[in-house]
Each structure stands twice: as C-alpha cells, then as structure tokens.
Amino acid sequence: MPEYFFDTSAFVKHYVDEDGSRTVSRLLAPADGNDNGLYVAAVTLAEAVAAIHGRGRRPGGAAGETHRIVARLRRDFPLLAVAVRVSQPVIERAADMAAKHVLRGYDAVQLAVAQTVDARSRAMGMGPVTVVSSDRQLNVAAEAEGLEVLDPTDM
C-alpha cells in the first residue's frame, strides 16, 4: 500500500472545496484501504485550524460554517492520519532545511517531518513516502531532497 505524508496545504483541501480537494479526499478515504500509511505533522492541526479560520474572516466568510468545519477537522484529525510529533532533532533538521531551501518556518518543519517519515518507511522496507502538497516552494525543496511529491492541484 502506498504511504503518503500530507502537508497542511493539502490536508485542508479535505475540508474546503478548492483545486485538488477531490484528489486529497480520495487519498484520505478509508474506503480506499488508506487507514494506515497516512501521515501528517502534529503541527498540521494548528496550521489547518488557522487556515480555515483565516478563510472564514474573508469577505463573504460564514463564521458558523467555519466553526462546523473546524469541529469536523478536530474530530477527524486523529482518525485520518498518524500525527507525527515534532521532536528536537526534527526541529534542528527543519532549521537546516529552512536555511538550505529558504523555506518559511512551518514549511521547513513539514519537510523535516516528511523526511523522517520517509526514512522510517524505507528502513522498514515499505518504500518511499509520497509528499502530498500544493505548496510550490515546499514541493521544489522536497524534490531536491529526493522525496516523491504529488501536487493535488496538478491532477
């Protein structure tokens, strides 16, 4: 079974309708047998809640809808994917990735967690992990680091 690491830009697509939402929802669907092998960084919860609330504050945003979406996300979060804790070594790797690839802080953390998950998967003989992200800068950095990348907006 393929394994996937979702960054926040992709994960939120499961909760808001935008380019790539169908692809992300299909990959996250338990009916596809994807109840294992799906990973996110633990910080994705905070980033996703912030992103959804940010959208709700835009003109035309509905506060009630935002709260329903966030409640669903919080309920689903531990069920959809394994949330990988961000340890001190991961933070140090993220700092290196931020400097090397000129990434924003949380993008560097996402990349460092993806590298950790990929290394663990390969060590266990399960093959590479595919990074699912619609963040172009993060995708370029992930590919430069030898990770497989799937941009759901390209499908």
Image (spheres, grey):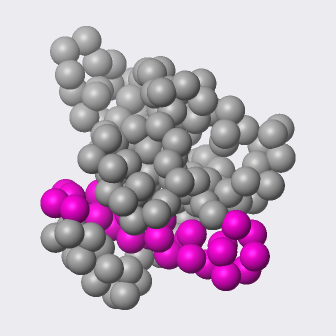
Residue 37 percent across, percent down from the top left: 70, 60
Please say if 155 is above or below 96.
Answer: above
User: How many numbered dots are placed on residues in this image?
Assistant: 0
Q: Residue at x 83, y 46 (%)?
A: 33
Q: Nearer the viewer, residue 63 or 148?
A: 148
- Residue name at image x 41 percent, y 76 percent: 86
Q: Which residues are drawn in magenta?
A: 101-127
144 or 3: nearer the viewer:
144
The residue lying toward the viewer, choosing from 19 and 12, is: 19
Q: Position of residue 116 (x, y in %)?
A: 50, 75
Say whether residue 106 is magenta.
yes
Q: Quadrant of the N terminus?
A: bottom right
**Residue at horizontal 49%, vertical 60%?**
147
Q: Is residue 89 left or right of residue 4?
A: left
Q: Is residue 3 visible?
A: yes
For the stretch drawn in magenta, the main secondary structure is helix
Quadrant of the image containing the C terminus: top right
Asked whether residue 46 is in view, the answer is no
Which residue is painted at 27% across and 47% down in the image? 137
Q: Is residue 8 left or right of residue 39?
A: left
Q: Residue furthest bottom?
A: 89
- Residue 12: image location, x then y, percent: 45, 38
In the picture shown, does residue 115 fall above or below 1?
below
Q: Quadrant of residue 45?
A: bottom left
**Image coordinates for residue 125, horizontal then vertical, percent:** 75, 76
- Asked if the magenta segment contains residue 31, the reply would be no
Q: Nearer the viewer, residue 7 or 99?
A: 99
